[in-house]
Amino acid sequence: MMPDDVYSLLWKVFLSFHVTSKCAVDSATLTSCELIAHLLKFGPAGSAHMQSGLRRTSAPGPWAPGLWVPGLWAPGLWAPGLWAPGLRRMSVRGLWAPVCMLLARLMVLADAESLPSFLKAPDDQIGISGGVASFVCQALGEPPPRITWMKKGKKVSSQRFEVIEFDNGSVLRIQPLRTHRDEAMYECTAANSVGEINTSAKLTVLEEDQVPHGFPSIDMGPQLKVVERTRTATMLCSASGNPDPEIFWFKDFLPVDIDSSNGRIKQLRSGALQIELSEESDQGKYECVAVNNAGTRYSAPANLYVRVRRVPPRFSIPPTDHEVMPGGNVNLTCVAVGAPMPYVKWMTGALDLTREDEAPVGRNVLELTDVRQSANYTCVAISSLGTIHTTAQISVKALLLKTRFVFILTALPKPPDSLLVTETTATSVTLTWDSGNPEPVSYYVIQYHSKLSINGHQEVDGVATTRYSIGGLSPYSEYEFQVIAVNNIGRGPPSGAVDARTSEQAPSSPPLHVQARMLSPTAMRIQWEPPDEPNGQIRGYRVYYSTRHDAPLSSWHRHNTDDGEMTSILGLTTDTTYSIRVLGFTSKGDGPLSDVLLVKTQQGVPTQPIGFEAEAELDTRIMLSWQWPVNDQIINLELVYWEASDLANKYQITLEPMGSYAIDGLKPDTLYMFSLAARSELGLGVFTQPIEARTAQSTLPLELHLLSLSSTSIQVSWVAPPAASHHGNIASYSLAYQALPGEEATRQAVTGIRFNVSSYVLDDLEKWTEYVVWVSAHTDKGPGPESPAGRIRTQEDVPGAPPRKVEAYALNSTAFRVTWKPPLPVKQHGQIRGYQVVYTRLENGEPHGQPLIIDVSLPEAQEATITGLLPEKSYSVTVAAYTTKGDGARSKAKVVTTTGAVPGKPTMMISTTIGNTALIQWQPPKEMVGEHTGYLLQYKRAEEEAFTVKDFKKTDDHFTVTGLYKGATYIFRLCAKNRAGNGEEYTKVVSTPEDVPGSYPQNLSVVDLSATSTTLSWDPPPLAERNGRIVQYLVVYRDINSQHNATNTTTDTRMTVQGLRPDTTYDIRVRAFTSKGSGPLSPSVQSRTMSTLPVPEFTKNFGVRAVTKTSVLLTWEVPETYQSQVPFKILYNQQSVEVQAHLKKKLIRGLLPETDYSFVLMSRGNSAGGLQQQVLHPDRS
């Protein structure tokens, strides 16, 4: 019993005695008992307080100094002189004083302290250089002692020395051992406030060649183990020596405490460690240690990973519909499985029939009695991974009223006989029986249970006929059935039992733990474990593999096996990534496919880690776990992760070989994606498909509020976290803030804000700048997690700099244009609302008259045109930006001089004709300045870059443009000219009417093909014959052996035609459409789809050896068994070339740069595969 518990008990005793006692006491006794009552009520703290109070007592009386020395609380309290004369002066009557004395003595016992004592002392050890030594020391005492380790009188300190604390003990671990340097006496000291004790052990370190005969040897050490939670894990260990060594186990450098595991952890006679009902806490690094009088040897450490399966709930036995007689009874059974196992409850409508806190796990039987009305009952299965439900209908049969005979029943019914199984399916069994009773039977009860189940019988109540089908059974399972007759007296004895096995069904789950390993560059071994739910006798497995994981499964290669759980696949292409999927099948059909496993055909490169899972542990941490390929020589693993909403920023971490890893520092309530690959000395394996996990919502108690006070200050306020979320009293707060955006912005911090302050003003900030702010609460243990980031922008101010790159140039005699760039973002100090252009006429270089202001109230404006000026005059112009707070600084003045006067804008009319011409007519400007010298006409098609330019005399007033295209847009510009230059332009845009395309799409070609598809590419019709905007294309294709055409439409100049037949030649054409209709069909191209038949071994390793600007070198290998003299044929982009097989290479010349080519090597119609290769562009070579 702890001291506090003793105080509590004594306080209750004291109260009880004080209330019931009728003894008379004098004032001295009352004072003494009140003092004891105080000590009992307030425990050790009260004791200390009252001791100090007693020492200050000076008045005469029962608690005078005479009592204290050597009185009640002195160390001599329990000496023969315990009851000092001062204590004897108390005047006491009755039993009250002895009780007070007894309580006082118990008080001191409850608060007793004790010297430390060793529970386990370290043992002498003899180790090996480069090996490990661990000294274990445990001690007890009150208060609990602190253990320290000393070597040669000094506290141990070295990178090779590690001290690991545990309950009542400490381990000193030395690794690696060094001869001579580590040989010493190591002292364990246990100390508390009462005193200290110490003990020591000797360490001897031998070189390997000095090891004596009989020194322990580890014959078999533990290996990496992955086990599912609740399963049994066995870590193997066997050792030899003379005498036979004793084996001990360490986990994470601490001794394994087998005695405290309640029998769950056992050490077998062989030395192996067996862990039953494994838990997540069992996960860690294990070492076995062999010890005899010759020395100590440690095994290599091995990790044990405990996996927690996560499977959404599903109904393995859903409830079935029933019909019952009025007043009958029926049991509805509902079984759901998953990992974790779901809770199962019943509902009818919105009414819960199962209390939330009483919902059983996995199986729930709803017992319905005295059923009078038909109703629906819903079974609900709930786990952390989701909620599912299913409904069963209970129907009450209608009674037909007939003349009835009255029978008087005086005995229970006899058991039914002739019970037979007449029909079975995968989930049901049909029974028939004879009543076996001459008297009427009210109904029957069917009892049944699975032969493999440890649960009792399930019942179907209220059966009114002698034939009944029981549903909801498990496939390929053996059941036992019996029937009971029921009359008005009660239930009779059961019939004889019959057995039946349900039929097989296709598996309902995929094979488990699919793994693959390369045996050679072209051969792979694949292995797996049987499905969890085979639903029958597994007759074999189908392995599907393909280089295109997104292709339809029908196009994947298929490899069948018998009922073995391993197979090899040969003839693979080297340096290629394959997708692998496996399914099991019974006599009733195929089960579901396993998830895709990616494998690279490069020997020595590790396979894909399997069982990759992610689970959020905190709002900033996600735990990842996996099974890495233990058969491969892994040197590390590469982990890539990113926020699902931010694909551009990915993070990569290199990990030591391990089976789990926790990523910290993540954002709360954020979805992350993870992918993992293993690396060996020979290269990096395939990354897993990305998995996702969302961090938990932040439980941070702080509620952050931000207020912008000015252009340079922000007020930050917060609400203190609730007391329940503290880990101690709040001592202070701290703020962190950072300007956004900008990589150069550094994170600033404000610390030491008092605990009773709930707001703070940040000063000297940048103007009109967005800041992100965090706040943290601190206890004496350190800072808590940061609050979610708050964002706020400081207030606007006037721009801090003028517009940049201000330029001004004359447009004509009465106008100039000024252009600028906005101030740099950091100098804008707000949202630019517009610009002010200020200009003044100059006379002899000095301003003349008042400045004029043009307000350009468009934030995005970067130019302005000033009109109404005088010819051949100079003007000074400046520009300033403004925000809602006012104008900013003005730019340096620019001086611009207007030109001499030029003509004004002429008038122009344009009329188009059907004959691809346009008539342009014009009249002179209304305002003609100077001598009129002629006109300038410019025109072009909108898609073209350059204008066509025509000059005309001043007497000309029209022009006909010929050669216009149909369905095209043209731009016309016309201006008058004088000796000062060109006048103001008149601009007009016209469009010619559209027509159907006059030509077909160009350069139709096949750029890719497979067994069931071909990909086409083409260019639009020539611009001159396009006759308008192309709105769609029509692809027309047919089997060359068929007259039936098929069509597809697209708006793109590329299309993949799907659903073709393998090894078939197709004729393909394409036509273009405008809004007016279709143009002509293009010349046809022919494309032959790939064959799905296995490729005979006429060649292998067909590949591209080198690529230049206009050529590709193809190479291949020919097996020794290939003797044919027929030349090979290489097909590429509708061209072909023959080559002799024994040459083993062919240089293809005359190719176009920057072009995709598809190469197929053929021999008598057999294809060695399609290679996709892009010829390099000359600029990239």
Image (spheres, rainbow, N blue to C red):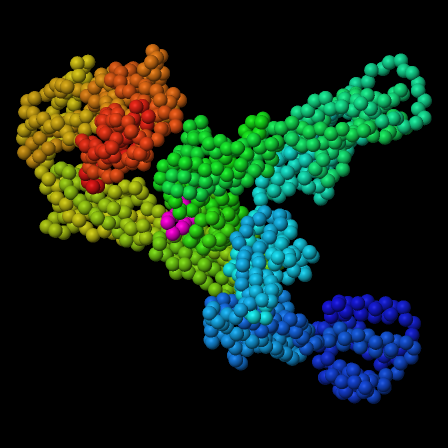
Count of labels in the image: 0
Q: Does residue 657 appear to the left or right of 419 in the view shown?
A: left
Q: Quadrant of residue 145?
A: bottom right
Q: Does residue 544 appear to the left or right of 284 in the view shown?
A: left
Relative to 1041, residue 831 above or below = below
- Residue 43: x and y in percent read 74, 71
Residue 688 in magenta stretch: yes
- Residue 937: x and y in percent read 12, 26
Residue 994 visible in the picture? no
Q: Does residue 176 appear to the left or right of 906 in the view shown?
A: right
Nearer to us in this view, 372 or 941 = 372
Q: Residue furthest top?
A: 1043
Region rendered in magenta: 678-689
Residue in the image at 82% along x and 78% along y? 32
Residue in the image at 83% along x and 25% along y? 416
- Residue 508: x and y in percent read 58, 32
Relative to 220, residue 214 above or below = below
Residue in the image at 90% along x and 15% along y? 404
Quadrant assignment for the N terminus: bottom right
Quadrant assignment for the C terminus: top left
Residue 738 in magenta stretch: no
Nearer to us in this view, 824 or 953 = 824
Relative to 199, residue 543 above or below = above
Residue 373 visible in the picture? yes
Nearer to us in this view, 221 or 827 = 221
Q: Does residue 834 appear to the left or right of 600 in the view shown?
A: left
